[in-house]
Image: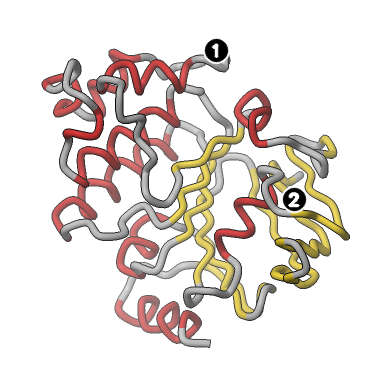
Amino acid sequence: MSALLNLKNVHAFYGAAHILHGLDLHVNAGERVALVGRNGVGKTTVVNTILGLATLREGHVHFGGQDHTRLRAYMAAQHGIVVVPQGRRIVANLTVEENLQLGAAVGRKGPWTVPEIYKLFPILQERAHTPGTALSGGQQQMLAVGRALMANPSLILLDEPTEGLAPVIVDQLAVIFNQVADQGTALLLIEQNMSLVVRVAHRYLAMAKGSVVAQGQVVNSREGLHDLESHVMV
């Protein structure tokens, strides 16, 4: 199977700081992959490298069989790559529905429309004309996911989507992520909540010091959870 996303021997920098060291990573079409590891090992830099926000000095990034090594962030959604960023980044002066419409601005066709997002997140329909930043943290995360889906992507990069959220909201998001993946969208889940990882991901990559040091299949069990947690502590 050819990879939807393929990073090969990637060396990425912020200025003079060398963050990613020969990183290899791939995600197949429709696949659910988790990227795990401690804070500071370079997980978010993987996202920024894919989006062209980190400086790639060696290696290649391919998406959909095309070379996107020099991809710019504003072009990513046009090629089917969207990110649900850490911190959500809801636009303050726009309503919920206006924030959703931002995701559709790229013009990609597909199944995700405002009515479909409202089916997925009924609370967003109830608060459609409320300022996006007036929502609770969990609702803002739902809005960030909905906005990403409105671009009808082939791949969603989820950067710490459960950070600061109550367990009940994490449970809701696990169900949503699985529903989205079941419809064919690939997920790259960057997450430290291992209970979410075992419920959503099928395969994991563990990072340390800017490179992948372990990988394998995710087993949704107590033993699988323990195995993942051990890799996070590398």
Element at badge 2?
Answer: strand
- Residue 100 sits in which quadrant? top left
Q: Is residue 141 above or below residue 75?
A: below
Comparing 84 with 33, the one in front is 84
Give coordinates of residue 190: x percent, y percent.
48, 59
Q: Amino acid at mark 2?
A: Asn
Identity, as a three-letter code, of the amino acid under mark 1: Lys
Residue topped by disc 1: 109
Estimate how packed mark 2 is, as few (under 14), some (14 to 19) or many (20 or more) residues with alpha carbons within 10 Å: many
Q: Is residue 166 above or below residue 158?
A: below
In this picture the colour scheme is: secondary structure
Looking at the image, residue 185 sits to the left or right of residue 64; the answer is: left
Residue annotated with mark 2: 6
Q: Residue at x 23, y 54 (%)?
A: 170
Percent of width and height locating residue 200 = 38, 55
At 51% across and 14% down in the image, what residue appears? 105
